[in-house]
Amino acid sequence: MKKQLFNLFISAVTVTLLLTACGGSSDNGTPDIIIPGEEDSECCNAEETFLAYAFLNNGFVKEITELRDTIADKYELRAYSAGGKLHVGYNDLYFALIKISTQGYVRDFEVSDITPVMTMTMKNMQHSTPTATEAVLYDQTFPAVRRAWVSFLMSSSDGGFWELSYKASTQKQSITHDATVINVDALASGLAWLKSFKAGDTTYYLSLVNPNNFQTGINTIQAYVSKQSTDKTKPYLAAEETFTIEMTPTMPDMGDHSSPNNEPLVKQESGVYEGKLNLSMTGLWNIHLVVKDKDGNIVAGGDNDSSGYSSLYWTITI
């Protein structure tokens, strides 16, 4: 991801040479970057503004316009995702706060209580999903960008719809963005980036982070382990328990052959799990999982499927 951001930065340098330092729009309808002309303690300086603009207008992330809101008619909160869309499984959410009077990016703001809720109209019930409820500083390189994530259990359909609410604040001003209907797309047939397992009476969810970025060879990958809330309408937060998740990739279309040199997903200080996954060729892969507790006892994935590997697995394609 760091390499991708660096490449975006280089590309943005070229693009910015074509932009003016005043307001307005370019010929293709994209707003021109606005470089602050004088010091504003609330907003980013020229370099920080440029970096935020370059990231949020790189063509990869786009605004989810349904989630836009204002704070005290002075600030505009915008939310972004890959392509401006959401799908089943893991999604990054990015937030930026813009000062309306100057169009400058505000440095200090908070987005919290991020709450996605699915209403299942056919069953007359509601439930939430794994999510980070607070947005945090995405990267020191982008002081005006906050990041959170949501991992959706299912897609929007005639039988149910998703809504998302949040709170935002800056300069002692705050708002509550009421639940807004959002669309969540299904993954391509056969893919599965979110799986669950039970340990005792508790249900846990395994969210694989951005598998669409995987490449052939050894990948450093991440995942989150979330726990279903007692009140199922409340966000499913990161589990406090510590697990180790062993991975075995196989190719079901190639006789279930595997690939060596994989390293288990291990919990990091930030709460995310990180490991190594070796994908030797392009195609469809099942990532078989064996979940162990802190004492090394298998709590999920101990039962094998017809291939002889764990019946708990993600399915991805590269």
Image (cartoon, rainbow, N blue to C red):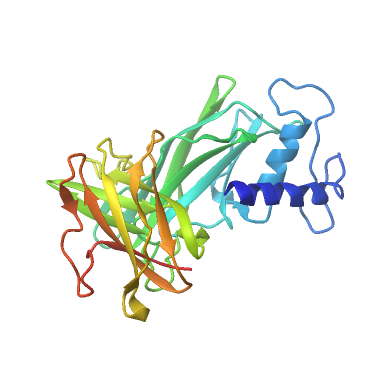
Q: Quadrant of residue 122?
A: bottom left
Residue at left offset 24%, top offset 37%: 241
Measured from the top left, where is residue 153 in percent x and y?
A: 34, 56
Measured from the top left, where is residue 72 in percent x and y?
A: 61, 27
Measured from the top left, where is residue 164 in percent x and y?
A: 43, 46
In this picture, residue 139 sits left or right of residue 201: right
In this picture, residue 238 sits left or right of residue 166: left
Name the one closer to the observer, 66 or 56. 56
Furthest-left residue in this view: 200
Furthest-front residue in this view: 261
Q: Quadrant of residue 236?
A: top left
Residue at left offset 49%, top offset 36%: 135
* Residue 172 visible, this orientation: yes
Residue at left offset 33%, top offset 76%: 252
Residue at left offset 57%, top offset 28%: 109
Q: Quadrant of residue 228?
A: top left
In this picture, residue 287 sits left or right of residue 279: left
Rendered position, 290 above or below 249 = above
* Residue 25 visible, this orientation: no
Name the one closer to the observer, 195 or 135. 195
Measured from the top left, where is residue 156 in percent x and y?
A: 40, 61
Rendered position, 256 above or below 99 = below
Number of labelled discs?
0
Name the one closer to the observer, 232 or 2. 2
